[in-house]
Amino acid sequence: MQLATLSSLLLAWHRLSAQSTLESFRSSALALLEEHLPISAAWWGVAHLRGGSPQVLQSYLHRLPAGFADDWLCSAELDELAHTVIEHPGVTVRYSSYEAPEDFDASYGIASALSTAIPVRDTGLVHFLSIYRDDSLPLFTEDDRALVELLIPHLFLAEEKQALATSPSEQANARQLTATVSKQAWLEQATPAFCQVLMAEFPEWFGGHLPSALLGMVHLGAGEWQGRTLDVSVSQGEDGSCHLSLQLRVSLGLTRREEMVARAYAAGGSHKEIARDLGLKPATVRGYLQQCYLKLNVSNKISLGEALRGDAG
């Protein structure tokens, strides 16, 4: 690739980061890459090593069947390529129909691949991208490998810029994060920050399908769930995609019941309504609110709401 062409591609990626939506960035970025390096398919996401095994937290499939990631899970422990890529960050690894797991490659027509992982700073996670060719295209060459190794850091940087450019609400309120979810209940478009928050709430979640507590909502395409540290909601986007939102609760020193009462009251509920909804007596609700006022050092409903949102101070 000529230097002028390389420069043009990098500029196009960075322009795209300021103009595209969360859902369209990756497909558009890969389309720009294909103008210079033909590919058949790609797998792009966020992963980490846990217990010595690669774990995929977020998965975007480009021209791959919906079941690709699920099938990969079944052979992940045998995937020496995945181990190699994650253990050697920044190095693009080339392979052609490697031996294990060869059945997986054959079933998806993978004849050649280039795979790269780049660490996400201060998270213990990595961005990864694997690009594939089937038998209709030549095998990737060493020159192709070297080129991709040069390009990938710029591509992942453009993706990080895109997440900031298209999520102003997340910049304004770092406690609220949103991702899109596939019909197979995998995170499809999610930032590393989103993955970290979800892992903190569900320490038993190692990647793959979303935690079981959320699956019912995802399959319905709607619902709300309250965890130890965050509130989770699921909704349908205008394009039919499934959106998963995480709202981190402020650490206020309140008990779980005090916080529930305080949030209901700040949202406009009366003592009687809150008592009915939570199965309490109105006098008990008043007692909880008095404790909340003392702990949060506030004196009215407005300042209570500000404290709960983290606006005070």
Image (cartoon, grey):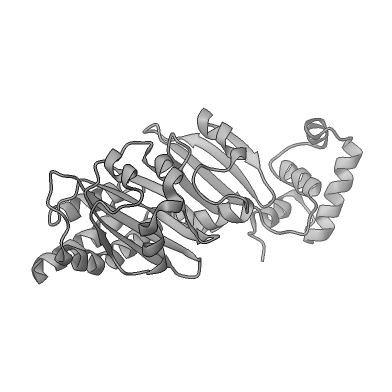
Q: Is residue 284 above or below residue 203?
A: above
Residue 212 makes an appearance in the image: yes
Q: Which residue corresponds to the image point at 57% horizontal and 40% vertical from the top-left?
A: 233
Residue 171 makes an appearance in the image: no
Q: Which residue corresponds to the image point at 70% horizontal and 59% vertical from the top-left?
A: 251
**Residue 96 x, y percent position in the rendering:** 23, 54
Q: Nearer the viewer, residue 48 or 23?
A: 48
Q: Which residue corresponds to the image point at 36% horizontal and 36% vertical from the top-left?
A: 66
Q: Which quadrant of the rendered structure holds the N terminus?
A: bottom left
Q: In the drawing, does residue 70 fall left or right of residue 4?
A: right
Residue 154 occupies quadrant: bottom left
Residue 163 occupies quadrant: bottom left
Q: Nearer the viewer, residue 125 or 192?
A: 125
**Residue 299 x, y percent position in the rendering:** 80, 56
Q: In the drawing, does residue 15 fall left or right of residue 8?
A: right
Q: Which quadrant of the rendered structure holds the C terminus?
A: bottom right
Name of the residue lying farthest toward the front:
99
